[in-house]
Structure formats: C-alpha cells, structure tokens
Amino acid sequence: MNLPSISIIIPTYGREVVLRDTIADVLKQDYPDFEILVVDQTQNHEPETIAYLQNLDDAGKIRWLRLTWASLPGARNYGVRQAKGEIVVFIDDDIRMEAGYLHQHARNYDRTEVGAVAGRVFDRMKLEDSGGDLEIEELPPEAMDPGIAWYYIDLVHTTKPQRVISARGCNMSYRKDIFTKHGIWFDERFRDSAVREESDFCLRLRKTGYQIWYDPEAHLVHLGEETGGCHDISTRSLKYQITFYHNHFLMAQKNLTPYQQLHLYLRLFDCHVLGNPPCNKSGSPIKIFTRGIFYSLGFFDAVKTQIKGLWDNGQIYTRQSPVTSHQRGSELIEESSVES
C-alpha cells in the first residue's frame, strides 16, 4: 500500500500543559511521512509553553503558526493552506493517542471513494454518562438523515466501520483536494465554539460524491478540557448560548431542505429548550423560557448571517487579510492567502 503524506493540524487556543502533552503524543507516531502544524491563536502563553513550542519549531519537528485572532474554522482553513500533505488530519489540543493512529486513518484512503475518515472518540464525559459499557454496531437509519442525524450519530460507542454523515472535529481527516480542487473550505461564519462547523463542512463534502467513512480503529481519547481549545468564550456565558443556536440554524439554512430544517428545529427545541432526553435539562419554567429566548435570538441571528452571506462567502479572515503575516518560530513570513 502506498502511504499518503499527512499533515496533522492542531488548532489551539488558551492551552498550556495539555497542549504540550498532545504534541508529545503526536511526535511518537510511527508513520513514515507526516508533519505537525500547530495553529496557535493564544496571545499570551506561559513561558514554559513558549519555550517548548519554540524549541520544537527550531528543530523542525513542528511548524508553529501564530495568529492574532481566534476562530476554529478560520484556524483549520489557515492550517490547510500551509499544509504539504496529501491528507490533512485535524485533532484537538486536548487529546491522547496511540502510536499507530496515523496508519489507521491512512489505510482508508486506498479506497478512491473515501474522501474523509471519521475516527472514534473516547470522550471522557460521554463515556461516564453511559456507564462505559454501551456498544453499538450499526448506527440507525436516522443517523444518515441530515435533519435529525445529530441526535443519532454516535462516534463514541460505535464499534463497527461504516459510512457516516459527519465526523467529529477532534478526530477527522480529509483528502486535501477537497479543499484545493473542489473549493470546499470551513465556513468562518460559524462562531466562537464553532459547534456544527464540521457538520456543515461534511454536508457540503458529500455533494462531491466522496464518502465519509467511520473507522473505530482510528481512535483517540478526548479529554474535554473545560476551557481553552476552540472556546474563546465560556460555555456558560450568555453569548455562548446564542452562538450555539446560531450555528445550528446556520448549518440548517445552508444545507437542509425545508422539511429537514423543520425536523431539526423541532428536535433542537424539544431537547435543548424543553430539556427532554437526550439533553435532560432542567424543566423549570423560568429556564425553559430563558432557553427559548436564546433559541429565538439564535434563529434570527443566523438569518442575519445568511443575508450578509449574499456578499460574504464565509471566508471572513481570508477576505480581511489577503496578505497574512505570521510567526514561524522567530522568523516572520509573508505569504498570500488562497481564496476559496
């Protein structure tokens, strides 16, 4: 088997020790041809982290790319534009992985119909919620319905390889030509925590004819740190609550039929506003009313984003900075961004 070259892209924000541990695990990979790109949106690191990243960059073991803004989809796009590999692998900055991880992703690309690989995620919190003994072989048919798939696709407990509708952002890989040949990029209008940005990308990817293949052997552990990572706002803030709904509605308005949108809106309301399973939120009338306000504000905010999208193609940071300056170690590099 001809092994493709791989670029591992690690967007990071506000992480210190856990970022260093993540990179240390990636450096232990036994894959013959790979590079590590750390797309760093942290403005002020601890001295130990700066020294660690600088030393690795100077030694050519990583490429340390520093940005002055915080956007997870923007950081993903930036990383792809710098990547040299035929396959791009995205991981979070709070994971642990075993040495054969890259081989498990790469082997799936022997099949020409596979354009993306979704890996299994041993998510600490979700495993605790299920008691750690739940196993799923075949995902239900609902897991391929874009309107309601997000409540049925389980990439934590599923043990059998199969075709899926989407990947999880902390463990996914793509052929680079999806970006460069087909012109599909992450939509940088997905804000802050960027929930559903990978779902939006995968729904658009499927229109190319490529399949998204789930391989449970391409697994890693997601630590799920409370702060940092893709969160440039607190998950408990009012802004996060509105953003959460905005991103769901934006994904739906961009990709779903009216019938599929209605399905998603009803499930979103039932679960996240009313608090019914699997969300299991408080049934307090005051809290339901408050969540309903966020739901409504998020919907109209997404409509506003869509209207603005008539002249904004979703590449906000690319459009703002046609020429981008960034630091790679101590050397300043000037390079032109690629329009999608």
Image (tube, grey):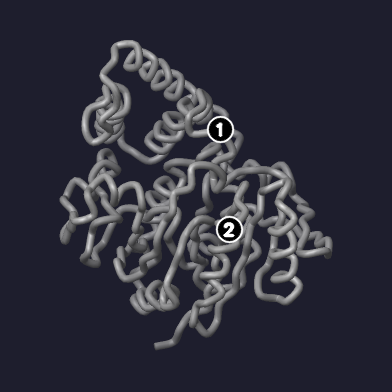
Q: Secondary structure at mark 2?
A: helix
Please, what is the three-letter code of the amino acid marked with disc 1?
Leu
Q: Quadrant of residue 60?
A: bottom right
Give the percent coordinates (x, y) of residue 113: 34, 70
**In the displayed structure image, the side of residue 80 where residue 220 appears, left or right:** left
Going from N to C along the chain, the mark reached first, 1 or 2, is: 2
Q: Secondary structure at mark 1?
A: loop
Gap between marks 1 and 2 measured at Cα: 38 Å
Q: Which residue is mark 1?
A: 310
The circle drawn on residue 23 is: none
Looking at the image, the residue that sits furthest to the bottom is 1
Classed neighbour count for the residue bearing mark 2: other residues with Cα under 10 Å, few (<14), some (14–19), many (≥20): many
Give whichever of 328, 51 is nearer the camera: 51
In the rendered image of this protein, does residue 261 appear above or below residue 316?
A: above
Q: Locate the N terminus and report the quarter of the image it occupies.
A: bottom left
Give the percent coordinates (x, y) of residue 201: 44, 50
Give whichever of 86, 284 is nearer the camera: 284
Give whichever of 123, 153 is nearer the camera: 123
Residue drawn where x is 83% and y is 64% of the image:
331
Please, what is the three-letter code of the amino acid marked with disc 2?
Leu
Residue drawn where x is 71% and y is 59% of the image:
48
Classed neighbour count for the residue bearing mark 1: other residues with Cα under 10 Å, few (<14), some (14–19), many (≥20): few
**In the displayed structure image, the side of residue 220 where residue 73 appears, left or right:** right
Q: How many marks?
A: 2
Q: Quadrant of residue 132?
A: bottom left
Q: Which residue is mark 2?
A: 19
Give the percent coordinates (x, y) of residue 74: 60, 48
Find out whether the residues at labels 1 and 2 contact each other: C-beta distance under 8 Å.
no
Give the percent coordinates (x, y) of residue 302: 47, 28
Residue drawn where x is 59% and y is 39% of the image:
232
Residue drawn where x is 37% and y is 49% of the image:
203
Please name which of the two marks, 1 or 2, marks the residue nearer to the observer.
Answer: 2
